[in-house]
Image: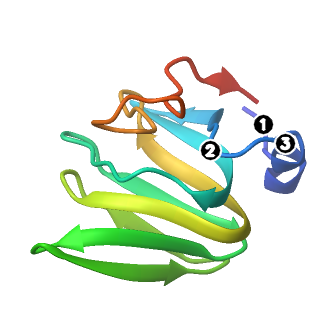
Amino acid sequence: MDKVNLAEKLSLISDYYNPRIAGELNDSYLKLVKLKGEFVWHHHDVEDELFFVVKGTLRMLVKEDEREREIRVGPGEFIIMPRGVEHKPMADEEVHLMLLEPKTTLNTGNVRNERTVENLQAI
């Protein structure tokens, strides 16, 4: 049992959309990731996700009732993405995130492509 310094851990990450495991809580991982640019539209069939913004502004696009909308999430704010909701994270400038998700969560959800990270590294 030890404390974790988010700024220190995030300083070790130099790439985007490649989540790292910073801790474990029951059947979930606490992940750290940096974003910049657009990710892919996807959803998670069985997992909810928590996105906590440490730095920057996250632009979360969601599709609800066949309509698209954007939710802006700033530092110190979080959004919980319910399972089954189609979403696409975006960042105009670099964003630092802390994620809380079940260990079974694949970063690209129902989509598999070059951004899919199957084997997460601990940081």
**Would you name the residue on which mark 2 appears?**
17
Judge by depth and name the residue closer to the eye, 10 or 86. 86
Q: CA distance from mark 3 to mark 2?
A: 10 Å
Drawn side of residue 116 relative to residue 80, left or right: right
How crowded is the residue under tag 2: few (<14 C-alpha within 10 Å), some, or many (20+)?
some
Contact, mark 2 vs mark 1 (Cβ under 8 Å): no
Quadrant where the image shows the C terminus: top right
Asked where in the image residue 91 lies, by quadrant, the reply is bottom right
Amino acid at the residue labelled 3: Ser
For marks 1 and 3 on the same chain, the one whose residue lies earlier in the sequence: 1
Task: Give whichever of 62, 50 is nearer the camera.
Answer: 62
Q: Secondary structure at mark 3?
A: loop
Q: Give the labeled residue for mark 1.
A: 2
Q: Residue at x 72, y 74 (%)?
A: 56
Label 3 neighbour load within 10 Å: few <14, some 14-19, many 20+:
few
- Tell me which residue sits at (67%, 22%) in the image: 121
Q: Nearer the viewer, residue 61 or 47?
A: 61
* Residue 19 position within the rendered picture, expressed as x and y whole percent measured from the top left: 62, 38
Task: Give residue 74's quadrant in the image.
Answer: bottom right
SS state under label 2: loop
Furthest residue to the top? 119
Query: As shown in the figure, which amino acid type bears the numbered disc 1?
Result: Asp
Query: Looking at the picture, which amino acid does disc 2 mark?
Result: Tyr
Query: Which numbered circle lies on residue 14?
Result: 3
33 sits left or right of 115 in the view: right
Marks 1/3 in contact by CB < 8 Å: the verdict is no
Quadrant (top left/top right/bottom left/bottom right) for the N terminus? top right
Q: Secondary structure at mark 1?
A: loop
At a point 56% along the width and 42% down the height, the residue shown is 30
